[in-house]
Image (cartoon, rainbow, N blue to C red):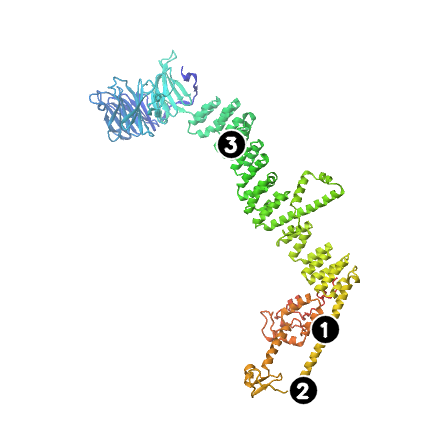
Amino acid sequence: MSLVETGWRQFTFFEKHTVYDPNNPECKFNGLKNLKAFRSVSGIGFTIFGEACGAIFKLSSNLEEYCWIAHKRSLADIALAGLILATVGEDEEGINSLVKLWQLDRIEKDAPFCIRVIRVCPLLGVGRSTRACAIALHSSLQHIAVGFVDSSVIYSTSNIKEKSGKWLIVVNGSSSGPGDEITGVFLTWIATQDLCILYCLTSTSVLSFSITNKTVTNKVVHDAKGCLRDCWSFNEARNQLIVGSTEMVHFYEAERSLTADPDSGKGRCHALGRSNEKIQLIAFDHHVALLTRQPTAVPSSNEMWTYVVSVYDTEGQSVAFSCALPAVARMFLLDNVLMVLSQDGTLSALTEKSISSKLDILFKKNLYDLAVGVAKRSSVASEYLPEIYKKYGDYLYRSGDFENAVQQYTETVEYLEPSYVIKKFLDGSHIKELCMYLEVLHAKGKANSHHATILLNCYIRLAARDKIRDFIDRNFECNIETAVQILRAANFTTEACHLCAKHKQHDALLSILIEDRADYKSALKYIAKLEIRQVEACLEKFGKCLLINNPEETMKLLSDRACFSQINGLALMKVFIGLPSQCTRFIETALKMDKKNNEKLHNLLLELRLRQWALRNFVDVLYKYFCYSTSLFSFTLFCSLHDRKILILVLHDTPNYDEDIVELIGDENLEESLKLCQLFNYVPGIIDIYKKMKRYDKLIEYYMRQNKLREIVEFCEQENSRNLWIDAVVFASRGKDIDPDAMKLLLERIEATNSIHPLVVLEILSKSDKICVGHVRDYIINWMERQNAQIEKDEEAIAENEAKMAEIEEQIDSVTYKVQIFQMNKCSACDTSLQLPAVHFLCKHSYHAHCLESYSEKADYCPACIRDSCNERIRDDKRRDFSTRSAYIKFQNEINESVDCMSLISSYIGNGLFDSWSKKRGSNNENEWASPQSDTSATNKLNLNEFEDRTSTETSSMSTAAPNPFLTPKTMNSRTAKSVESTNPFDVDENSKNPFEEDL
């Protein structure tokens, strides 16, 4: 019983229809009715038939017929290579076989052109006369083989169209005794091995020979028991020889004939047409067409035999078509279409159905495996395979075969939406199948991050650690954060760390080490290997936890990086919240190298110290309260364990002296330091900052708010500023509680420094309702005594000056009204004896006339006296030069700093501040501050004596005059002003400029 009868499914994938005459569509085509062909070969667009009588018949694809006589007596075999037809036959009586080569595209004398004629009988050797019965021609026209009736085979390799090469006797029938007739020969070229394989078929055996360099290198005897002349075919597309023996149909791959392996002669075989007589076999595409005959089963039929045409799909192991026909003469291929010629001349064509029609047939029978094979063997496989796999998978899924179903779904990865498959296998019992599909999805690069997450979840549920590690190593695209969360939730921390390290997810890795595994040492080692910015970010996030759990190594890491100025110390301050000891150590280390944030770090350290100082004071107060009011045991119960730790740290780390905190206050960014000191009410710091900022008014104000008069006095004495002393007196006058000792100290210091006039002091103190005469009595008495002493001293000076003036007046009268006697004997210039002509001066100096001319340009001035007089005048002029701006500024400064302003003003008046000489001298000077646009003529020059009272009206012609810096802004900016206000500081009405005006 054949396999076909037991297992192969039968379908109708071909349609049989009769071929009609193209010239007369209503009539059947009868062009081959009288054809007695025994051999046929198919070319591109035509088929060649050979008749035993020697005629060749050519049928084109449009059913055009053409024939000619190739051999005059008989035709043994034909072979086709492109447009070259090779025939072997007899032209004469006797044994004289000829091989003829015909060029089909060249017609001469109503027949194709015969390229060459070869007599093959002499090629076997002298004295041998054997008829040729088979021929093979390779498509390259470089190889030709001829078989004989005694089983001899000869072979030649050369360009057979041009010359005849040396022939090789492959099989010598005479040496092996009478052999079987050759039923077929065929040549195929193995390009990879650069050799030719020659197949020789007889009725009892099948042989193959490997030939290279005109030498047989290997011989293989195949297991087929021979075949008839038309029962073999070579499928050039698959390089496969198909032999239809009596029992089986054998398939031999050409590559297997290259070795001398005992199994190389064995091939795949199927029992096709086993119970019937095989008439003809044709291989095309992936099909094998077999024509068989069997005795007719219909008794009433006139035909003895029933012919069956069967088309087999050997790869799909199915019968594609099978039909019983009466009196079939021959099958042949015409343009790759299987044609069936009946003995009555009727021509039928077996046309293959479309791929969609075949698939519909298979789908109806749920034969999806066959549908896959059919689609793969078609030229449009990519269009149909995905849908076939999908339907096949759905069918298997419905049948409960989930493993095979997912295998089919994996073939649809590039075409079917993955969610369609994933939804089917989300159930917990199908995790394994879901993993298979997702793995293929990732392998083909069609997975996204969601698919990767699902696959990772599947591995976790299967506890497949090896697959998880492989998943991480393959760098599949996935959401790293989600994957890490999944692994952490499933306690796969090692794999999660590996994933984070691979993708440089530093935060996630440290979070696992610190939060999940409490492996602080490993976390610190990992941080130390990172780049600077990453180290800073990681410490900012996890530094506090590391400081609490592993303080020493964490501080070492922080200090090492800070010392090399590798991290921004300011950015890590929040790490030390609640950890003052570590914070102090870190800031002190960072200050050494972090120049960029030095000021801010100083302020942070200052704030930290101030907080510790404030907390220490609070603890001291609290401690004293519990010690003196209740008991120390109550204090211990009052504080929790955590509080006691904090208190111990505070008491241990807080500076013991104010100098330690004050030293932290730098000379820059004092405003920020001041705010901190004010926030914590740190008095030494506030005082130090006010001094550095030179904001004495604020310092005095601060002392005033604190009611610290003694400190005010000490500060004023230290700075020795008149304004500060005035502020101190004002504060004393406004005080609610008067400390007699402090008041006495204040007045003593004012008296000692002589910074404020006593009248000013008394004027200010007189405004107070709390200060009585007793507080200032000693001060007034001392001042009066000093004044009396000064009066006595001044009276003595006046008397002395009056005596000098009387003496000078007496000298003037003597010179004016009395005779002067000149008794000088020597010249005051050359110190030689005085000789006439001589010149005598009332100053008692005498000169030679020529000496006087040499030493003096003016004859009426004494050279000796005029020099001293000029020097004195120059000094006096400089002393009394009030025309410059610097003189006025000097005067203002002296007024502001002077204790006795009246004495100062008197001295200026005595030096000619308001006399006509000063005005005249000032009018002769150039205006220093004249505008560049002002006229240089004498009419535009102004009197620049800054002390002159200008009340004259300015005319419009003075609009180009330079502005006077001592005029009021209104006067300076108005060019049309008619009057100029006086610049005399004692002539203004503004109370703020009068030091004696009441300002309290």
Residue position for label 3: 469
The first of marks 2 and 1 along the sequence is 1
Q: Amino acid at mark 2?
A: Tyr
| Residue at the image position 58 percent from the left and 73 percent from the top | 936
Q: Amino acid at mark 3?
A: Arg
Secondary structure at numbered mark 2:
helix
Question: CB atoms at circles 2 and 3 under 8 Å apart?
Answer: no
Residue position for label 2: 817
Q: Quadrant of the N terminus?
A: top left
Rendered location of residue 162, percent (x, y): 25, 31
Q: Residue furthest top?
A: 299
Rendered location of residue 707, percent (x, y): 74, 55
Q: Amino acid at mark 1?
A: Asp
**Which one is closest to the eye, mark 3 or mark 1?**
1
Q: Which mark is residue 54?
A: none
Residue position for label 1: 794
* 806, 915: nearer the viewer: 806
